[in-house]
C-alpha cells in the first residue's frame, strides 16, 4: 500500500517503566524452569497504559518540535485500557495540548494495535485530512500467575508522529502492507482478568504465518530483498520467535539486533513492535532502510518499509530506549503483584 | 474528589500550567483570582518541568486513597523558572531523596476513586533521566 502523498515519521518517543522482574524470580515462586526472556518490565504503582502513552507522546512532540494543537489525531493501541469505557486517547491528547480539534480513539488488536494505529495515521496524513497524526502502542500486559505468559507479559510503549514528507522527516514510509485472518490463537473475554492462549498453536499457524505473509508480500510488492535493509524489526513476544522469523525471512541477527529488546524487557504487547522501531531509530543513520513487521493475535501483521533521513541526527535528543532499559530496579514477586493490582484486599 | 472538580483542574495538573499576572509578571501555581499587585488580569503560564528538591518529607500514614503508596515522598521543588511546587517524588527510594536532587515532571496516576470511579492523573516528579 502506498499513500497519495508521501508520509513519514517526524517525531518519536518511547518509554519503559523502571521496575524489572527476573524470570528466575517467577521460577522461585512457581517451581518452574522456563526463561523465554531474562527479565521483564513492571509498572510502578502509579503507572498504566495512559501514563506510559503520555511519556512517549511528550517525547515525540518535543523531538518533532511542532505545535501540538496541529496534531489532528491521537490513537492509542493497547489491550490494557485503564478504563473499559472511556478513551485513553482523550487524556493523552489533553496532556500534550492537542485538544480540542483532534480525533482520538483506542485501538484493540492484541499486540498489533499500535501498528494498526500507525496504519490509520499514515492514511489520514497521506490523504491530506490531517497535517500531523500520532499513533501510540502501549501496554501493561496481563499474564496469569504460573502461566507461560507470566514470564513475558510486560509494560512499555512508543509514540510516532506522522506528517507529510519534508526535510523535517526523520524516516519516510516507502510502503506498508496488512495481512489478517481469523486465527484464534490468543484472546481475553470481556471482564476476564487474564488472557487464554493456544500454546503451540500461537506459533506456526499464527505468528509465523502472518509475519511471513505480510513481510513477503511487502517485499514482493516493492521489489526489495532482505539485504537491501540495514535494520529489521519483528514483533517480539519472546526472544526466540523474532530470531526465527528473521531467519525464515532471510534477515540476519545483525539486522534485528538494535530492535530486539524483548530479552531484556519482555513483550510489551501493543508496544512491542513500536519500541523495537524506536530502539532502531535510536541508532539508525541517514539513508538506512528499516523493515518492520508486527503481529497481533486474532490474527494479523502490519509490515512497513521506512527510509531514514538526515533529520534523524537532530531529532532524537533526550533519553533513548537503551536509557530506559538500563534504568532498572529489580522487584520481588510480591511487589510485582502489588504494583499490578493483583493482590486482592 | 468530585468529577467536576477534577475536570476543572485537568489542564493545570496535566500540563503543569499556572498563570502569570499581565501587570507585574508574578507567576502563580495553583492560580489565584487576585494578584499581590491587585490585578485580576492573568494569562496562562507553562511552568518549567525541571527543578530541584528544596525540602521533603516521607509519608508513612497516608490520607484516604493514598494508603497503598506508603512510604512515599512529598517534596517542595524549586523549578528552573523559580516557581515552587509541592509534589510527590517517585522512581526513587524515600531514603535516597536529598536537598538539591535534580528532578523532572512526569505524568502519573495520583488517585483512584475506588474500583468504579474515575482515575485521577496529574504531575509528579522523578530524578532526571538523561
Image (cartoon, rainbow, N blue to C red):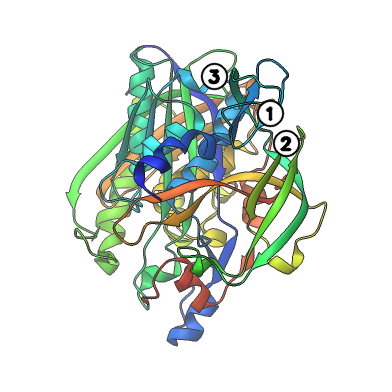
Residue A345, above or below A65: below
In 3D space, how far apart are the residues under numbered discs 1 and 2 (Cα atoms)?
Answer: 7 Å
Q: Residues within 10 Å of mark 3 (few under 14, many from 20)?
A: few
Mark 1 and mark 3 residues within 8 Å of each other at the beta carbon: no
Residue B90, above or below A289: below
Q: Using the image as rendered, state which of residue A213 and residue A178 is in the foreground.
A: A178
The quadrant in which residue A147 appears is bottom left
The quadrant in which residue A55 appears is top right
In 3D space, how far apart are the residues under numbered discs 1 and 3 (Cα atoms)?
Answer: 23 Å
**Residue A195: % across, % down:** 27, 64
Determine the residue located farthest toward the bottom in the rendered image.
Answer: A31
Quadrant (top left, top right, bottom left, bottom right) of the N terminus of chain A? top left
Mark 1 and mark 2 residues within 8 Å of each other at the beta carbon: yes
Q: Using the image as rendered, state which of residue B42 and residue A18 is in the foreground.
A: B42
Mark 2, secondary structure of its residue: loop
What residue would you read off at disc 2? B83
**Residue B69: % across, % down:** 54, 66
What residue would you read off at disc 3? A67
Q: Chain of mark 1?
A: B
In 3D space, how far apart are the residues under numbered discs 3 and 2 (Cα atoms)?
Answer: 24 Å
Amino acid at each position: 500500500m502506498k499513500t497519495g502523498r508521501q508520509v513519514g515519521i517526524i517525531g518519536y518517543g518511547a518509554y519503559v517503566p523502571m521496575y524489572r522482574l527476573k524470570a528466575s524470580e517467577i521460577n522461585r515462586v512457581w517451581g518452574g524452569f522456563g526463561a523465554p526472556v531474562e527479565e521483564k518490565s513492571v509498572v510502578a504503582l502509579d503507572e498504566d497504559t495512559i501514563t506510559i502513552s503520555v511519556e512517549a507522546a511528550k517525547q515525540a512532540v518535543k523531538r518533532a518540535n511542532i505545535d501540538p494543537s496541529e496534531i489532528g489525531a491521537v490513537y492509542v493501541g493497547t489491550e490494557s485500557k485503564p478504563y473499559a469505557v472511556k478513551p485513553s486517547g482523550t487524556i493523552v491528547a489533553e496532556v500534550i495540548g492537542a485538544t480540542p480539534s483532534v480525533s482520538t480513539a483506542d485501538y484493540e488488536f492484541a499486540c498489533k494495535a499500535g501498528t494498526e494505529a500507525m496504519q490509520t495515521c499514515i492514511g489520514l496524513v497521506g490523504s491530506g485530512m490531517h497535517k500531523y497524526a500520532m499513533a501510540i502502542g502501549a501496554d501493561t500486559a496481563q499474564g496469569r500467575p504460573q502461566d507461560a505468559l507470566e514470564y513475558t507479559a510486560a509494560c512499555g510503549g512508543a509514540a510516532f508522529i506522522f506528517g507529510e514528507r519534508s526535510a523535517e522527516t526523520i524516516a519516510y514510509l516507502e510502503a506498508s502492507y496488512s495481512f489478517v485472518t481469523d486465527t484464534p490463537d490468543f484472546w481475553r473475554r470481556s471482564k476476564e482478568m487474564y488472557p487464554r492462549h493456544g500454546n503451540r498453536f500461537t506459533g506456526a499457524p499464527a505468528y509465523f504465518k502472518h509475519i511471513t505473509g505480510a513481510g513477503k508480500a511487502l517485499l514482493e510488492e516493492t521489489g526489495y530483498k532482505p539485504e537491501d535493509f540495514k535494520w529489521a524489526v519483528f514483533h517480539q513476544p519472546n526472544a526466540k520467535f523474532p530470531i526465527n522469523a528473521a531467519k525464515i525471512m532471510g534477515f540476519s541477527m545483525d539486522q534485528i539486533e538494535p530492535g530486539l529488546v524483548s530479552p531484556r524487557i519482555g513483550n510489551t504487547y501493543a508496544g512491542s513492535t513500536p519500541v523495537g522501531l524506536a530502539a532502531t531509530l535510536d541508532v539508525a543513520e541517514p539513508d538506512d532502510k528499516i523493515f518492520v513487521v508486527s503481529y497481533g493475535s486474532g490474527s494479523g501483521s502490519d509490515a512497513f518499509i521506512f527510509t531514514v533521513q538526515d533529520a534523524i541526527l537532530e531529532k532524537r535528543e533526550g533519553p533513548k530506549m537503551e536509557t530506559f532499559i538500563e534504568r532498572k530496579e529489580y522487584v520481588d514477586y510480591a511487589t510485582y503483584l502489588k504494583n499490578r493490582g493483583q493482590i486482592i484486599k | 474528589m468530585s468529577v467536576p472538580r477534577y475536570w476543572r483542574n485537568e489542564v493545570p495538573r496535566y500540563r503543569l500550567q499556572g498563570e502569570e499576572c499581565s501587570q507585574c509578571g508574578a507567576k502563580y501555581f495553583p492560580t489565584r483570582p487576585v494578584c499581590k499587585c491587585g490585578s485580576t488580569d492573568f494569562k496562562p503560564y507553562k511552568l518549567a518541568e525541571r527543578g530541584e528538591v528544596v525540602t521533603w518529607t516521607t509519608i508513612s500514614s497516608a490520607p484516604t486513597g493514598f494508603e497503598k503508596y506508603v512510604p512515599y515522598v512529598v517534596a517542595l521543588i524549586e523549578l528552573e523558572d523559580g516557581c515552587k511546587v509541592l509534589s510527590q517524588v517517585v522512581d526513587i527510594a524515600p531514603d535516597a531523596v536529598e536537598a538539591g536532587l535534580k528532578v523532572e515532571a512526569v505524568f502519573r496516576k495520583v488517585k483512584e476513586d475506588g474500583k468504579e470511579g474515575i482515575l485521577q492523573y496529574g504531575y509528579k516528579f522523578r530524578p532526571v533521566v538523561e
